[in-house]
Image (cartoon, rainbow, N blue to C red):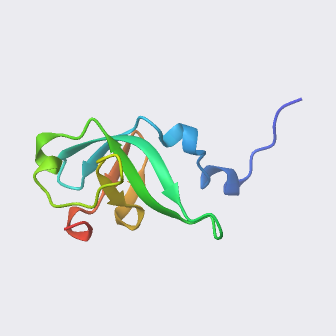
Amino acid sequence: MAEKKTMEDDSKKFSKHLLGKTIVSKAGKRFGEVGDLVFETKSGEIIHIVVNNPTPYIEKMDLEKDKQGRVLIPFSSVIAMGDFMVIAEEDII
């Protein structure tokens, strides 16, 4: 039997589909890849994206880092998710 798909299904993404996606700015600058997501346990709200393989460009920015020294990007700066995770660079500096 065919699986019924609703409009709501298209607006939801599983975290496993986000991991490994390339993070880019609206202008096309590459920042790295989605390594992990940091979320608030009580509300379930995603707070940060942990960047894997950060580019020299993002390393020069004075962004927050976790205890392991990995760069964190505020999830609130995400403006689109598809083949890439697109962020508004002006929201992180």
Expressed as whole percent of the image width and height from the top left, the position of residue 61 reads 14, 57
> Residue 90 at what x, y percent from top left?
20, 68
Residue positioned most to the front: 67
x%, y% of residue 12?
Answer: 62, 53
**Residue situated in front as seen by the camera: 66 or 27:** 66
Report the number of discs: 0
Residue at 75%, 45% (x, y): give it.
Answer: 5
Write down the quadrant of residue 23 in the picture: top left
- Vertical comparison of 60 with 45: above or below: above
Quadrant (top left/top right/bottom left/bottom right) for the C terminus: bottom left
Q: Residue at x 11, y 47 (%)?
A: 57
Q: Relative to residue 37, is residue 71 drawn left or right?
A: left
Vertical placement of residue 48 versus 15, above or below: below
Front-lying residue, 90 or 39: 39
Residue 41 in the figure: left or right of residue 86: right
Identify which residue, 12 or 91, lies in the foreground.
Answer: 91
Position of the N terminus by quadrant: top right
Q: Position of residue 16 (x, y in %)?
A: 56, 38
Residue at far top of view? 1
Left or right: 91 with respect to 11? left
Q: Residue furthest right?
A: 1
Q: Nearer the viewer, residue 92 or 11?
A: 92
Task: Identify the residue shown where x is 26% and y is 47%.
Answer: 24
